[in-house]
C-alpha cells in the first residue's frame, strides 16, 4: 500500500482501535518474553498472516484479532507499551490529536465475565487495563507531543459488559477517557440487548460522549437506532446510511459526524472495492461532517497516509477538502469545549486560514 504523504499537515484521527494498531514487532517481543508460540517469527511473516489482502466479510475480518490479541491480553507491560508506541506511530503520521478505542474487557484476565482468549485467570482487571492504557498514552503524549485520548468499547456480543464500560468511562474521565463506543459484529442488533441501551442511557445521563459502530455492514436502520435509541453523537463508519435518503438527509441536517475508514471499508466488504464508487465521495460532495481514519492499521497493513493517498489518488480529494474534513473532525471530537476550540484553532493556524477577529 502506497505510504506517500499527500497531505503533509496536522491531522486529527477519531476512529482507530488500539488492539488493531499494535506493532508486529511488539507482538513478537511479548510472545517471546511470555513463551507464547506464534505461527511466525519475523515481522514480515507475521504481517503476512495477520494482514488482509483481499476483501472478506466483517465477520471474517474480526477473526483476525484472535491471531494475536492473546499475546498482549493480561500483560501489564504489553498493554502499556502498545499504548505508548501507538502515540509514537500517530505522531510520525502527523496526527496532532487522536481518539483511540479498545475494549478493556477483551484485554483483561480477571474481573470479567468470560475471560477471553483461553487465558488462565490472572490479576489484570478491566480497570487495570484502562489505567495501563492511560499511562501509556500519557507518557506517549509527553514524549511525542501528540495529544491522545481514549474511547472505551462495549462489544455487541457481550451486553453484560456494557454497564461496566460506562463505570470505567465515568471513573477515568479526568484521566484521558473521553467517550464510549459499541463495536463488534453488527449483525447483532442492540434492540435484542437492552443492556447496551441501558448503558448508553446512563452514559448520556453522566455526560459521557457517545459513538456507535453502525451502518458499516448493517442496514440503515442500525444507524437510526444508534442515533435515536443510543443517542450517538458520532457514527462509526455509517456507509449504509446513504441507502436511506430520508435518514441521510436528516443526519446531514443535524451535522452528524461520520467516522469514515476507507481502506477498512474495502477489506471488510462493507463497501464496493472500487474506491471511485465509495460513499465518502457523496459525503464530500454534500460537505458532510466526516473524518478519515485507519480503523485497524495492523490488520489492514496500512497507515493514515495510505488513507489520504487513496482519497487523493482514487477519489479526487483535494488539499482544501483534507483541511475541511480535519476541521470537522476537530469540531466533532470528544474533548471538553475549551480544548476542542484550541485544537480547531491550531489546525486553522497550521492550514493558513486566517481567523476572523469579528471586526
Ligand atoms: O471495523 C470494525 N467494526 C466492528 N468492530 C470492530 C472493527 N474493528 C475492530 N473491531 C472490534 O473492536 C474491538 C475493540 O477494539 C476489537 O477487538 C474488535 O473486535
Image (cartoon, rainbow, N blue to C red):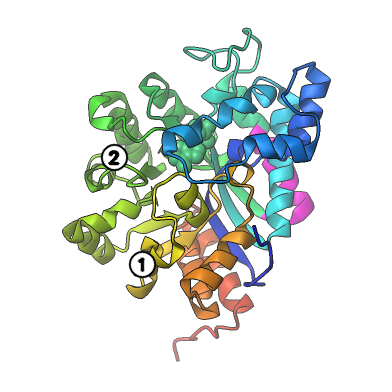
* 84 to 233, vertically: above or below: above
Q: Which residue is mark 2?
A: 230
Q: Do we see residue 130 in this rendering?
A: yes
> Quarter-wise, where is residue 304 in the image?
bottom right
Distance CA(mark 1)–CA(mark 2): 23 Å
Q: Do we see residue 138 in this rendering?
A: no
In the rendering, which numbered label is found on residue 283? 1
Answer few, some or many: residues within 10 Å of disc 2's Cα (few below 14, many 20 plus, some between 14 and 19).
many
Point out the residue furthest to the top here.
121
Residue at 64% in and 57% down: 1
| Percent coordinates x, y for residue 272 in the rendering | 39, 55
Segment colored magenta: 133-146
Answer few, some or many: residues within 10 Å of disc 1's Cα (few below 14, many 20 plus, some between 14 and 19).
some
Residue at 46% in and 52% down: 266
Residue at 39% in and 48% down: 270
Point out the residue furthest to the left here.
246
Q: Give 266 or 14, whichever is nearer the viewer.
A: 266
Between disc 1 and disc 2, whose residue precedes?
A: 2
Give the label, 1 or 2, closer to the camera.
1
| Percent coordinates x, y for residue 78 in the rendering | 73, 29
> Quarter-wise, where is residue 129 in the image?
top right
Quadrant holding the C terminus: bottom left
Amino acid at each position: 500500500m502506497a505510504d506517500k504523504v499527500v497531505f503533509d499537515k496536522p491531522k486529527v484521527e477519531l476512529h482507530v482501535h488500539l488492539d488493531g494498531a499494535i506493532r508486529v514487532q511488539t507482538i513478537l517481543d511479548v510472545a517471546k518474553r511470555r513463551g507464547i508460540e506464534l505461527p511466525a517469527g519475523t515481522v514480515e511473516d507475521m504481517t503476512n498472516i495477520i494482514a488482509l489482502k483481499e476483501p472478506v466479510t466483517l465477520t471474517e475480518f474480526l477473526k483476525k484479532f484472535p491471531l494475536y490479541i492473546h499475546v498482549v491480553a493480561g500483560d501489564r507491560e504489553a498493554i502499556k507499551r502498545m499504548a505508548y508506541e501507538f502515540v509514537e506511530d500517530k505522531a510520525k503520521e502527523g496526527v496532532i490529536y487522536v481518539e483511540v478505542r479498545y475494549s478493556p474487557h477483551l484485554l483483561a484476565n480477571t474481573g470479567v465475565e468470560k475471560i477471553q482468549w483461553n487465558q488462565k485467570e490472572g490479576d489484570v482487571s478491566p480497570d487495570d487495563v484502562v489505567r495501563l492504557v492511560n499511562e501509556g498514552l500519557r507518557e506517549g503524549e509527553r514524549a511525542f507531543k501528540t495529544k491522545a485520548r481514549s474511547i472505551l468499547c462495549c462489544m455487541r456480543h457481550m451486553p453484560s459488559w456494557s454497564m461496566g464500560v460506562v463505570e470505567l468511562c465515568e471513573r477515568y474521565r479526568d484521566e484521558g477517557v473521553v467517550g464510549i463506543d459499541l463495536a463488534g459484529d453488527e449483525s447483532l442488533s442492540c434492540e435484542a440487548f437492552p443492556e447496551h441501551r441501558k448503558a448508553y442511557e446512563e452514559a448520556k445521563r453522566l455526560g459521557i460522549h457517545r459513538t456507535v459502530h453502525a451502518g458499516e455492514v448493517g442496514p440503515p436502520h442500525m444507524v437510526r437506532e444508534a442515533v435515536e435509541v443510543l443517542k450517538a453523537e458520532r457514527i462509526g463508519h455509517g456507509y449504509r446510511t446513504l441507502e436511506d435518503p430520508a435518514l441521510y438527509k436528516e443526519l446531514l441536517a443535524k451535522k452528524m459526524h461520520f467516522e469514515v475508514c476507507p481502506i477498512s471499508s474495502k477489506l471488510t466488504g462493507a463497501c464496493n472495492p472500487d474506491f471511485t464508487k465509495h460513499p465518502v465521495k457523496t459525503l464530500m460532495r454534500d460537505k458532510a461532517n466526516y473524518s478519515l481514519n485507519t480503523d485497524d492499521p495492523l490488520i489492514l497493513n496500512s497507515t493514515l497516509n495510505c488513507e489520504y493517498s487513496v482519497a487523493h489518488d482514487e477519489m479526487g480529494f483535494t488539499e482544501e477538502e483534507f483541511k475541511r474534513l480535519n476541521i470537522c473532525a476537530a469540531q466533532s471530537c470528544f474533548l471538553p469545549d475549551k480544548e476542542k476550540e484550541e485544537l480547531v484553532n491550531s489546525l486553522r493556524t497550521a492550514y493558513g486560514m486566517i481567523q476572523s477577529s469579528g471586526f
